Amino acid sequence: MIRGIYIWIRRRRGADKAFMSPWLFVIAGLLAAVTLAGKRVADEEATSNRAVERGIVATPDDATPADRCETKVLDQADSMTAAQRATIPAGLSLSAYARQFCDQAAALGALASNGDVIQNDKLLLTTCVDGLMASLDALPQEERRFSATDFRKFSDRYCAEAIDRDLLEGARDGRHKGELEQLQQAIIADLLATGEITEIP
């Protein structure tokens, strides 16, 4: 924007070329980099202090990206509804669930130094599959259509295709509910037809 204004002013004054105007890109880039770096450092410090308050680490210097991630997840969880809390796998405390998620994000290279999760397909796939498998674990045995092994085959393929089609974004608020249900039925039908999975009698 600054470069555009600069060129416009120069041309209005009769100059054909904006002297050194490309350098404004370089200057703006450096300023942006310094600003972003400063914000990230400030965020890291603030989150490290919150980690101490929550008892996750003893001192701010002890905080790792996973510790900061856990802190941010727990901070967000303070405003979760009962329905959202119900999605946490049975047998896991909120803190344990947050730590498991953050360790997983770190292992998949999806964790920034300030604890922010950088969404990538690997993390989306793992989170999606784990969520589906947790929903199966919550079902009584008599209500299950497939074995855990067969359901895992379905989950792997369903989540991969949902990610390819960009259907997982907004899935929680029902934006792609119809498309996801159609995809689910199509994959189950195909896996049954090919004999890759079988229904429990």
Image (tube, grey):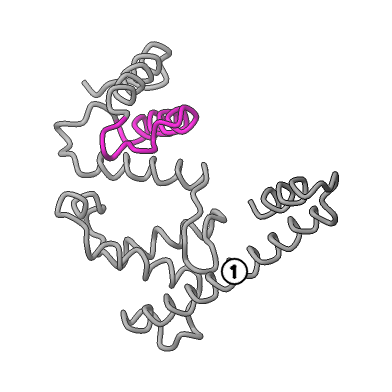
The residue shown at (26%, 52%) is: 89
Magenta-colored span = 147-175
Q: Is residue 118 left or right of residue 174?
A: right
Camera-side residue: 95 or 119? 119
Quadrant hosting residue 2: bottom right
Q: Which residue is mark 1?
A: 35
Q: Quadrant of the C terminus?
A: top left
Q: Residue furthest top?
A: 193
Q: Secondary structure at mark 1?
A: helix
Q: Position of residue 180 (x, y in %)?
A: 33, 26
User: Which residue is drawn at the image coordinates 83% and 48% (left, top)?
Assistant: 15
Q: Residue furthest bottom?
A: 59
Q: Classify residue 130 by image quadrant.
A: top left
Crowding at dot 1, Cα within 10 Å, few <14 / some 14-19 / many 20+, comes out as few
Q: Position of residue 192 (x, y in %)?
A: 36, 16
Whether residue 26 is situated above or below residue 113 in the rendered picture = above
Q: Residue 171 lies in magenta, yes or no?
A: yes
Q: Does the magenta segment cover residue 200?
A: no
Q: Amino acid at mark 1?
A: Thr
Between 6 and 128, the one lying in front of the other is 6
